[in-house]
Image (cartoon, rainbow, N blue to C red):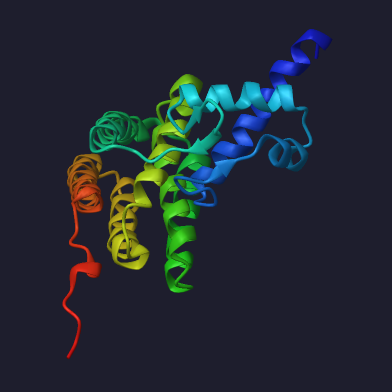
């Protein structure tokens, strides 16, 4: 590595570590990202961390306000819809390209859906969501484009931010377990048309649930302080 490339590599690595933490649900919307704390945690300089944070701002994962610092973003309904439009486009293309996937790549897909199942059996719904997103990342990897893989890594992290709108993690995550298994089984059987139909319905339903959660999250609620005193 050339010396003048080192700062760029370090900032990209730091951004990747923070992105992965968002993907795993370890950094929820509204979480502050203190420069001093994260520079020490990631073992990088504060300048390098600032470069990493700027990258994540550009990806729509965090926001930075003057005099307040950086925080993990909460997504709007419009952004959730855009994320699912991208997911549908790339994942359906991945299903088509699975026809040319190697045995090793298909084995990795099976391993990832089995990770979803194990997390569900353990009732670890945060890990279940992470494993499911990793399964869908493997679908996109069938396209064979490093640029699209990098794009989808950011999209998957944004999807995880959207998942946080679901108040009951089990109720949101549990229905998708069998759907992931179904899609994987269809692809292993060579039924790409069936997998595409199942995937499209899956993503449409997931988007609908999250948009309803986003709407409910923003609705006004009556104040409990206006209740009459008991006699």
Task: Please tell me whether residue 42 is drawn above or below residue 13 in the rendered image.
Answer: below
The residue at the point 22 percent across, 40 percent down is 196
Whole-percent x and y of residue 27? 53, 48
Whole-percent x and y of residue 209? 21, 52
> How many numbered badges does the structure rendering display?
0
Whether residue 10 is visible to the viewer of this picture, yes or no, is: no
In this rendered view, identify the residue nearer to me: 45 or 97.
Answer: 45
The residue at the point 72 percent across, 22 percent down is 47
The residue at the point 29 percent across, 66 percent down is 171
> Hey, which quadrant is residue 15 in on the image?
top right
Task: Please tell me whether residue 119 is drawn above or below residue 196 in the rendered image.
Answer: below
Q: In this view, does 88 lie to the left or right of 97?
A: left
Q: Residue furthest right?
A: 3
In this rendered view, identify the residue nearer to me: 200 or 72.
Answer: 72
In this rendered view, identify the residue nearer to me: 44 or 135.
Answer: 44
Whether residue 29 is visible to the viewer of this picture, yes or no, is: yes
In this rendered view, identify the residue nearer to me: 216 or 198.
Answer: 216
């Amino acid at each position: 590595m050339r010396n003048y490339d080192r700062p760029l590599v370090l900032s990209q690595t730091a951004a990747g570590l923070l992105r992965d933490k968002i993907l795993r649900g370890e950094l929820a919307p509204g979480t502050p990202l203190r420069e001093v704390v994260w520079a020490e945690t990631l073992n990088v300089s504060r300048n390098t961390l600032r470069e990493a944070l700027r990258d994540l701002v550009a990806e729509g994962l965090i926001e930075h306000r003057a005099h307040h610092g950086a925080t993990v973003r909460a997504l709007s309904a419009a952004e959730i819809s855009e994320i699912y439009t991208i997911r549908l486009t790339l994942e359906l293309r991945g299903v088509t390209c699975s026809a040319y996937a190697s045995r090793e790549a298909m084995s990795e897909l099976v391993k990832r859906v089995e990770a979803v199942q194990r997390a569900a059996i353990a009732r670890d719904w945060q890990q279940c969501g992470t494993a499911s997103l990793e399964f869908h990342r493997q679908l996109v990897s069938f396209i064979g484009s490093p640029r699209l893989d990098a794009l989808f890594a950011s999209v998957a992290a944004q999807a995880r931010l959207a998942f946080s709108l679901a108040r009951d993690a089990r109720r949101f995550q549990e229905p998708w377990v069998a759907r992931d298994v179904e899609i994987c089984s269809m692809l292993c059987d060579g039924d790409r048309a069936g997998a595409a139909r199942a995937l499209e319905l899956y993503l449409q339903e997931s988007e609908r649930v999250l948009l309803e959660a986003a709407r409910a999250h923003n609705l006004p609620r009556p104040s409990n302080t206006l209740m009459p005193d008991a006699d």
